[in-house]
Image (cartoon, rainbow, N blue to C red):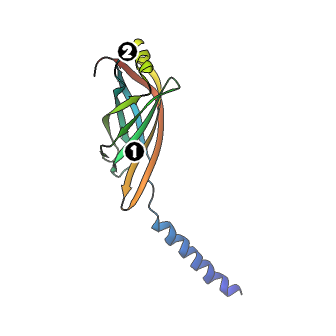
Amino acid sequence: MKYLRLPLFALLSLGLFLAGCASGAKPGGITVTAVSLQVSPTDLRVPLMLHFANENVVPLGYSSSVHKLYLNGSFVGKAVNDQPIGLPPMNAANREVYLQLDNAALARQLAAGGSRPVHYRIETVLHQTVDEDKLQIKTASEGSLELRVGTN
């Protein structure tokens, strides 16, 4: 009976090892931060400048992304970016996306405060296709962004 345990253990270990090799690693080490937001009292679709940073030693590419922006703790709007973005290893890139503001009153309220830094939180979902697998990488960051008032 003791002699049966060793081959059974070896077979089980080999099966677990092969199962682990079959599933690809999900990339991480990506951060998305907001740099600036340009608001207007009349526009509900406004430019939001984002900074994408790749902390990996391999290049990463994303086919699309969705960003939810909160200013001073309140939801402001959502930006959907259908343009792919490629990030070299250990490098960064800026991308302008268009944020759809939640309502016209909010746009007027943001513009009335003038240009100033504001606290933000951004929740991002990055979409990536690897072979036939579709991956979603979620990331969130917060800090201070430059709120600019002007025309687009």
Farthest residue toward the left? Answer: 152
Q: Which residue lies at the image location 36% right of the left edge and 50% below the top edge? A: 57
The three-letter amino acid code for the residue at tag 2 is: Ser
Q: Position of residue 145 (x, y in %)?
A: 41, 24
Q: CA distance from mark 2 to mark 1?
A: 32 Å
The three-letter amino acid code for the residue at tag 1 is: Glu
Q: Which residue lies at the image location 37% right of the left edge and 15% below the top edge? A: 115
Q: Nearer the viewer, residue 126 or 3?
A: 126
Q: Position of residue 48 (x, y in %)?
A: 35, 29
Closer mark to the observer between disc 2 and disc 1: 2
Q: Position of residue 15 (x, y in %)?
A: 54, 74
Q: Position of residue 36 (x, y in %)?
A: 36, 25
Using the rendered view, name the quadrant where residue 30 is placed: top left
Tell me the tag on residue 72: none
State which quarter of the image contains the N terminus: bottom right
Report the residue marked by disc 1.
55
Give the secondary structure at mark 2: loop
Report the residue marked by disc 2.
115
Q: Is residue 27 visible?
A: no
Give the secondary structure at mark 1: loop
Q: Is residue 138 above or below residue 149?
A: below
Q: Which residue lies at the image location 34% right of the left edge and 26% below the top edge? A: 46
Q: Is residue 140 visible?
A: yes
* Marks 2 and 1, the one that precedes in the sequence: 1
Using the rendered view, name the quadrant where residue 148 is placed: top left
